[in-house]
Amino acid sequence: MKRLFLSLLIGGALLAMTACSGEASFKKAEDAQDAGREFIRASLDGNMKKAEFYLLKDSTNTMLFNKWKNDFYNKLSTEERMNYQQANILPTEIVNVNDSTVSFSYTNTYKNKDTTTVRIVRVNGEWLVDFKDVH
């Protein structure tokens, strides 16, 4: 009986560690550029869990990010997704707005005529992408 209980206890602990390891495996951004690069790369690759890790968590950002996934990314063809995955990020302008806000403008080698700007903010010591201000 003790063995069965111990086996269930160990199995449950392993299952809990595995379930929690998703976000724990992502590394916090060291600076604003790091947060921007990681978010953009994850978005281009279709790694939405990783992109969300670098997203400022509030209800508006979550709603906008989910809308972007459903209305844009999920509707891409397999070929378009592959093209985005193979694309390189090309920063065009990085501006320190103040000590806790950075504007990161970029394009990519797949859609190199489309420039996107994301705002990266430092909240509680963490650099995160504020999706409300993507243009």
Image: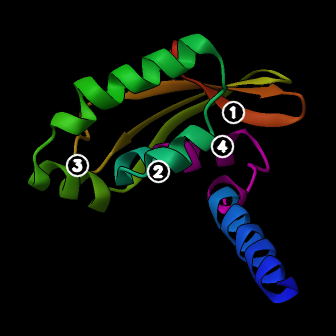
In the rendered structure, are the residues bearing label 2 and label 4 in contact, judged by CB atoms less than 8 Å apart? no
| Residue 123 position in % (x across, y down) | 82, 25
Residue on which the image places disc 2: 42
How much space separates mark 2 and mark 4, taking CA atoms? 11 Å
Judging by the rendered image, the residue that carries numbered circle 1 is 128
Amino acid marked by disc 4: Ala
Query: How far, Cα to Cα, is label 1 from label 3?
Result: 25 Å
Q: Is residue 5 left or right of residue 11?
A: right
Q: Residue at x 36, y 39 (%)?
A: 107
Q: Which residue is mark 4?
A: 35
Kind of residue at disc 2: Ala
The Cα–Cα distance between marks 4 and 3, rounded to whole angstroms, is 21 Å
The label shown at residue 110 is 3
Q: Which mark's residue is nearer the viewer, 4 or 3? A: 4
Tell me whether circle 1 and circle 4 mark residues in contact (CB < 8 Å).
yes
Main secondary structure found in the magenta portion: helix
Q: Residue furthest bottom?
A: 3
Viewer-proximal residue, 134 or 55?
Answer: 55
Residue type at tag 1: Leu
In what element is the residue under mark 3?
A: loop
Could you tell me the amino acid type at mark 3?
Tyr
Of labels 4 and 3, earlier in sequence is 4
Q: Determine if the magenta segment contains residue 40.
A: yes
Give percent across and percent down for residue 104.
57, 31
* Of callouts 1 and 3, the N-terminal one: 3
Task: Classify mark 2: residues with Cα within 10 Å, few (<14), some (14-19) or many (20+).
Answer: some
In the rendered view, would you say 78 is above or below 14? above
Q: Nearer the viewer, residue 58 or 131?
A: 58
From where the camera sits, is residue 18 visible?
yes
Q: Residue 24 location in percent, x, y? A: 72, 58
